[in-house]
Amino acid sequence: MQNKIHATAIIDPKAELDSSVEVGAYSIIEAGVKIDANTRIGSHAIIKGPTTIGKNNHIFQYVSLGEQPQDKKYKDEPTTLEIGDNNTIREFCTFNRGTIQDKGVTKIGNDNWIMAYVHIAHDCHVGNHTILANNASLAGHVDIHDFAILGGFTLIHQFCQVGAHVITAVGSVVFKDIPTYVTAAGYDAKPHGINSEGLKRRGFTSDEITYIKRAYKTLYRKGFSLEEAKKELLTMHEACNKIQLLSDFLNQSTRGIVR
């Protein structure tokens, strides 16, 4: 292991690093950190435990991972940060651990592309295959679903959810949940159609995208209440099973959706 760790790096003896892990100059890895195979840590990174990091991650210089949550209720409880596999985490990102008032864990999934200066606060859950552009910030208790893309400087308020395949414009400020497939922009964020280009890139057929557009119109253009729209969407499931993902999101949303 030592030949992959720079001589100036400080590794606590109670940290557990696979023999293939690389650690750059002046990085500090504290007790309670576990890092799996082929993960690369750049220089001047600080990783505190309890934190678990999976395989094949590339973590760039000057990140801060596993620091205590920015929550006045936090009293040194042993909460955690969990990062999956194949993630890219760029310079100056800050990910905080969870709190016992919620999940107790901040969790990042697999295959995410997280750009410079992104902040992920306590008790957030980020799914798989997401892109968080520079300076995107998640307040506490935020859920980001699979394949979501947050434009640069997007801000997500506490307890909000961002559905799968969502995209937000640069500088969006989000105070409500963004339903699956929706494009959102503005302060505060409003819906602006569906993320059709993203769906094409992920292999959705033209028929599926047509049905998703109809679902969007049902939700936003026909004057239905949310409950009425949800009932209408049920009739679309048999024709296109992709509508189920949107319906499931709406049924579990508790904060209300962007309008």
Image (cartoon, rainbow, N blue to C red):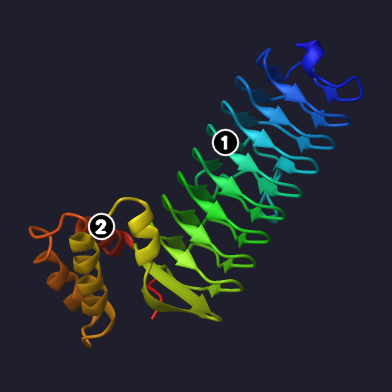
At which x and y percent is residue 174? 52, 72
In the rendered image, which quarter contains the C terminus? bottom left
144 or 153, which lies in front? Answer: 153
At which x and y percent is residue 60? 73, 40
Q: Is residue 220 left or right of residue 47?
A: left
Q: Is residue 77 left or right of residue 248?
A: right
Q: What SS does tag 1 mark? A: strand
At which x and y percent is residue 142? 51, 57
Q: Which residue, given by chain and number where applicable, does mark 1 sit on?
A: 83
201 or 37, which lies in front? Answer: 201
**For mark 2, does the 10 Å Cα neighbourhood hold few (<14), some (14 to 19), or many (20 or more) residues?**
few
* Picture residue at 78% right of the left edge, 17% below the top: 4
Please say whether residue 88 is visible from this viewpoint: yes
Residue 201, quarter of the rendered image: bottom left
131 or 16, which lies in front? Answer: 131
* Picture residue at 55% right of the left edge, 67% below the top: 157
In the rendered image, which quarter contains the N terminus? top right
Amino acid type indicated by mark 2 = Asp
* Picture residue at 44% right of the left edge, 61% below the top: 162
* Picture residue at 63% right of the left edge, 53% below the top: 121
Please say whether residue 179 is visible from this viewpoint: no
At which x and y percent is residue 145? 42, 52
Amino acid type indicated by mark 1 = Ile
CB atoms of marks 2 and 1 within 8 Å: no
Residue 191, quarter of the rendered image: bottom left
Identify the mark at residue 10; answer none if there is no mark.
none
Q: Which residue, given by chain and number where applicable, does mark 2 sit on?
A: 248
Q: What SS does tag 2 mark? A: helix
Residue 26, quarter of the rendered image: top right
Q: Is residue 208 left or right of residue 28?
A: left
